[in-house]
Image: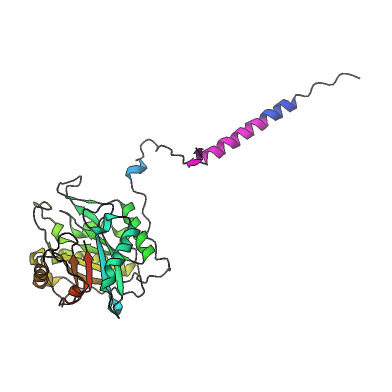
Amino acid sequence: MPDRAPDNRWPVLCLVLLVMVGLIVIAWGVNHPTEVDGAPRAVDPSPRVGEPSPSVVDPVETPAARPPTGTDALPGGGTKVFAGHRFLVAYYGTGGTGSLGVLGETDPDTMNRRLHHAAASFHRPGRPLRYVYELIVTIADGHPGPGGDYSHDIARSEVRRYIRAAHRNGALLLLDLQTGRSTFPEVAKRWEWALRDPWVGLALDPEWRMGPRQVPAHTVGQVGAGEINRTSLWLARLTKREGLPQKLFVLHQFRTDMIRDIGRVKQRPELASVQHVDGFGTPRQKLATYHAVARPQQFTMGFKLFYDEDVRRLRAPGVHAIRPKVRFVSFQ
């Protein structure tokens, strides 16, 4: 019998199997984080040439989440901000710092517990409380900044953090604008993505609305009724178009000249308009300011309490005794 030729297929099959195993291992490694000392480490690919770094660009915005119930009711129920004789209590400030108010002195959930504690004394039978986070999202600056408008926006991620906290804790979120030399309508539109949320409202602070030659903190700003009306019209149309409940709409004021032609400020059914009287000092000084600027025939009235600047700070009974009646109080 002639000798059989040697079979060379087995080494080839082994080589093919090794190559396939190697490809599987490489593919698994690309799609899974590696581990160092038992802790997963995410893969962090570098951006492509010509693409901006993710660290300096906000992600694409999606509409804000609806409340967990899947309805457009306000926290506590209903679609009107002050329905059921509700009394609103707010903490004011910006995220991550206590320098502009009590809101940012701690994390949102701890702040919420402090807010509930501060608000408890304002409760009265038949007057349920509604809680508000007033978050300064556009902050006035003493320097022009890149845009030359003497203001800057806080990070959108910080605003999203407070939106999530508001829904988690059953509170309204109020976006406060200190626009520098920019107009209120143009700045408000930058926050449209957040204002689509049914629990998010808007506050305008004319103290920080500067003229073309003015600088924040060197003068008290002012705004005309026309600019307020353009802002409220835009917000009312957004509210109606999105099928949202009534939005809280707040105007801060502590001097009569801060809002020119205030009698021409329009009321809109889609918005719960509040004239919020600020100003610190003794109770007598604060009440004198309140009576000088209050227009209860035109607005629901608000009042501010300062933890540090007020002298003999008014307590809940004193606030409830104010006439014209106050229905919204905030702490700074």
Image colouring? rainbow
Residue 115 % position (x, y):
29, 64
Q: Foreground residue, 284 or 62?
A: 284
Residue 299 visible in rendering? no
Q: Quadrant of the N terminus?
A: top right
Up the image or down, 232 lies above or below 144; here it is below
Query: In the visual, does 143 lie left or right of 245?
Result: left
Q: Is residue 153 magenta?
A: no
Q: Foreground residue, 11 or 317?
A: 317
Residue at screen point 19% across, 73% down: 319
View extreme (front): residue: 312
The quarter of the displayed image where residue 294 is located = bottom left
Up the image or down, 265 lies above or below 209; here it is below
Highlighted magenta segment, given as a residue range: 16-45
View extreme (right): residue: 1
Residue 12 % position (x, y):
70, 27
Up the image or down, 228 lies above or below 61; here it is below
Q: Quadrant of the C terminus?
A: bottom left
Residue 286 % position (x, y):
11, 68
Residue 98 % position (x, y):
24, 54
View extreme (top): residue: 2
How many marks on residues? 0
The quarter of the displayed image where residue 132 is located = bottom left
Residue at screen point 31% across, 70% down: 240
Residue 108 visible in rendering? yes
